[in-house]
């Protein structure tokens, strides 16, 4: 079974600061997805990265998939209180139709 | 697009009773649906995977006779927690994946909070 290590586990920052969340594995994933989850709600898909080295931007969020497709990062520029939530990375194992393996999540708190 | 709904959003039941949770894909046909369980401050734990018209595949350690899953159509899957006990109290989330060939994305429902008293 492939494992995803996500770091940091907790992050508390001030509004306006930048941050990076990392998702690492020793295994190769066919794709990797990032989700954001708020308390009492289901995860919401932010982005899917498929190609090694791929970079995708979603407003102030930048997602990168490692060249070897074993790791990924999420960078948030000028964080805002509305960015607060649990960020989860998930890798698809065993090909495109495989199950998602979730990291343990990064709980982000952005204080005004 | 890609909206998944769950019903109910929360439920309280007495120990020993059964509870059914519905998961629907509203604007796409879900060939595969997944059921997860999430404990407070923890990540999602996959319970089972179901494909339309076939039996669900359960993850190791998940009792198939206790957590009954039915995926009768391409837009509906149900999870029935039978003879519920307080330790079954948790946040249950379904997700759905549709399309063919290279469709990696799963869309999640809003979750169902189950409390067993």
Image: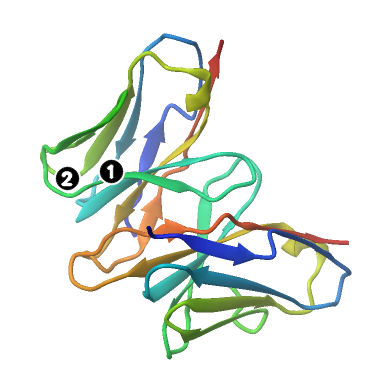
* Mark 2, residue position: A69
Picture coordinates of residue A99, whole percent (x, y): 35, 64
Q: Position of residue B22 (x, y in %)?
A: 61, 73
- The residue sitting at 31% across, 52% down in the picture is A91
Q: Are marks 2 and 1 in contact (CB under 8 Å)?
A: no
**As displayed, is residue B53 above or below residue B22?**
below
Q: Pinpoint the chain carrying mark 1.
A: A
Residue B31 located left or right of residue B101 = right
Labels 2, 1: one chain: yes
Q: Percent x, y for residue B33?
A: 44, 72
In this view of the protein, which residue sits in the foreground, B29 or B58?
A: B29
SS category of the residue bearing label 1: loop
Label 1: how many Cα within 10 Å (few below 14, some 14–19, many 20+): some
Q: Quadrant of residue A75?
A: top left
**Label 2 is found on which chain of the structure?**
A
Q: Is residue A1 left or right of residue A15?
A: left
The x and y percentages for residue B60 are 50, 71
Relative height, residue A19 to residue A91 (above, below): above
Of pointers 2 and 1, the one earlier in the residue sequence: 1
Residue B74 is drawn in which quadrant? Answer: bottom left
- Identify residue for label 1: A25
Which residue lies at the image location 47% right of the left edge and 68% below the top edge? Answer: B26
């Amino acid at each position: 079974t492939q494992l995803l290590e996500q770091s940091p586990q907790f992050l508390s920052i001030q509004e306006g600061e930048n941050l990076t969340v990392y998702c690492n594995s020793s295994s190769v994933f066919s794709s990797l997805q990032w989700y954001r989850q708020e308390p009492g709600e289901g995860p919401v898909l932010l982005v899917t990265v498929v190609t090694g080295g791929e970079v995708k931007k979603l407003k102030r969020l930048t997602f990168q998939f490692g060249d070897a497709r074993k790791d990924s990062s999420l960078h948030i520029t000028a964080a805002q209180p509305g960015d607060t939530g649990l960020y989860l990375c998930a890798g698809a194992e065993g090909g495109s139709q495989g199950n998602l393996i979730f990291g343990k999540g990064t709980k982000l708190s952005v204080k005004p | 697009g890609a909206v998944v709904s769950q019903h109910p959003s929360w439920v309280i039941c007495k120990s020993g009773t059964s509870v059914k949770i519905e998961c629907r894909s509203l604007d796409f046909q879900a060939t595969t649906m997944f059921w997860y369980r999430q404990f407070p401050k923890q990540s999602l734990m996959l319970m089972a995977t179901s494909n339309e018209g076939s039996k669900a595949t359960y993850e190791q350690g998940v009792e198939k006779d206790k957590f009954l899953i039915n995926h009768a159509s391409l837009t509906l899957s149900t999870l029935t927690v039978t003879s519920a006990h307080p330790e079954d109290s948790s946040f249950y989330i379904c997700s759905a994946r549709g399309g063919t060939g290279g469709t990696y994305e799963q869309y999640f429902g809003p979750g169902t909070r189950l409390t067993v008293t």
